[in-house]
Amino acid sequence: MRVFLTGATGFIGSIVVEELRAAGHRVVGLARSDAAAQTLASRGVDVQRGDVADPARLAEAARASDGVIHCAFGHDFSKYVEMGEADLRAVSALADALAGTGKPLIVTSGMTAGTYGRASTEADPAQTEGMLGVRGRPEQLALDASRMNVRSAVVRLPPSVHDVGQQGIVSMLVATAQQTHVSAYVGDGLNRWPAVHRRDAAHLFRLALERAEPGERLHAVGEEGVTLRSIAEAIGAKLGVPTRSVDPAASADHFGWFAAMASSDMPASSAATQRRIGWRPTQPGLLNGLMDNYLAGAPLTT
């Protein structure tokens, strides 16, 4: 296929490029800068100049493709709602451009289902209100596109997509430990986050492009739930700082805006994804990476 990929120079998208090219697909990557264009060209990727905030340019590139993978999402979490609105416009443009073609549209989402006390599954619908709706509304829009003869599917990513040197949202815990000289968790720390290695996630994106059914949700979950206490202990051991509990009432003082996330319990299963699409996570787990090399050489802030 000739695959249009947004976020092609990003942490996940750059590995999706490798996956697609190794499988024989031709990749067209969106580049908003000369540096991004040069990076993509050096990796054998055709360059589509433009910005994910330009719906017309996205639609043009989508119409010229055999399929689309949408990985781009902003990183300024102080403007999280605005990033979600931009994502909604982007997904709408891509879906409209592919309407009536039967071509695949694979859209990235987060763990947007509101399940409490149990692991979320692929069958759980996204929440479309509140903060979970920031990712949930674009997810639902993408799935609704299946009614327009688009082979649309969603890949939900866990909060920690990790690899050497980067840990996804866990990086926020690392940064807080470096700044405060304490590796903390909230309460008993038994709340859980799912996790996946980025190479496993990239492999699922490729399988979704090739195999996903219209309207399908897929979970890129390699580990169903890693406790925040075990994550904090691994960070503390690597950085050489004490690990301790923070009272829930004081969590905002310690973690700032990140406190709600640090308190969240959000285990998730990928059993249906593995069974239906033949995906198997094979890369190292989050704690192995934290202890082995992800934090190697990371100095404490003084």
Image (tube, rainbow, N blue to C red):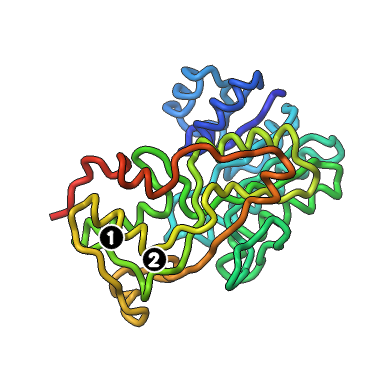
Give the image quarter of residue 184: bottom left
Residue 64 to residue 196: above or below? above
Residue 32 to residue 267: above or below? above
The kind of secondary structure element at disc 2 is: helix
Please name whichever residue, 275 or 154, is drawn nearer the observer in this view of the structure.
275
The kind of secondary structure element at disc 1 is: helix
The image's mark for residue 146 is none
Q: Position of residue 218 (x, y in %)?
A: 67, 48
The residue labelled by disc 2 is 258
Amino acid type at image mark 2: Phe
Rendered-image quadrant of the N terminus: top right
Give the image quarter of residue 72: top right
Q: How far is the residue under mark 2 from the one under mark 1?
A: 10 Å
Q: Residues within 10 Å of mark 2 (few under 14, many from 20)?
A: some
Q: Which residue corresponds to the image point at 24% horizontal and 54% vertical from the top-left?
A: 237
Residue 210 to residue 252: above or below? above
Q: Residues within 10 Å of mark 1 (few under 14, many from 20)?
A: some
Q: Which residue corresponds to the image point at 63% horizontal and 51% vertical from the top-left?
A: 270
Rendered-image quadrant of the C terminus: bottom left
Q: Position of residue 76 (x, y in %)?
A: 43, 53
Q: Seen in the image, is 108 located left or right of residue 103? A: left
Q: Earlier in the sequence, mark 2 or mark 1?
A: 1
Q: Position of residue 71 (x, y in %)?
A: 58, 41
The residue labelled by disc 1 is 176
Q: Position of residue 34 (x, y in %)?
A: 45, 26
Q: Seen in the image, is 110 located left or right of residue 284? A: right
- Toward the bottom, the furthest residue is 249
| Label 2 with label 1: CB-CB less than 8 Å | yes
Amino acid type at image mark 1: Thr
Give the image quarter of residue 136: bottom right
Q: Which residue corresponds to the image point at 28% horizontal and 44% vertical from the top-left?
A: 295
Residue 73 to residue 82: above or below? above
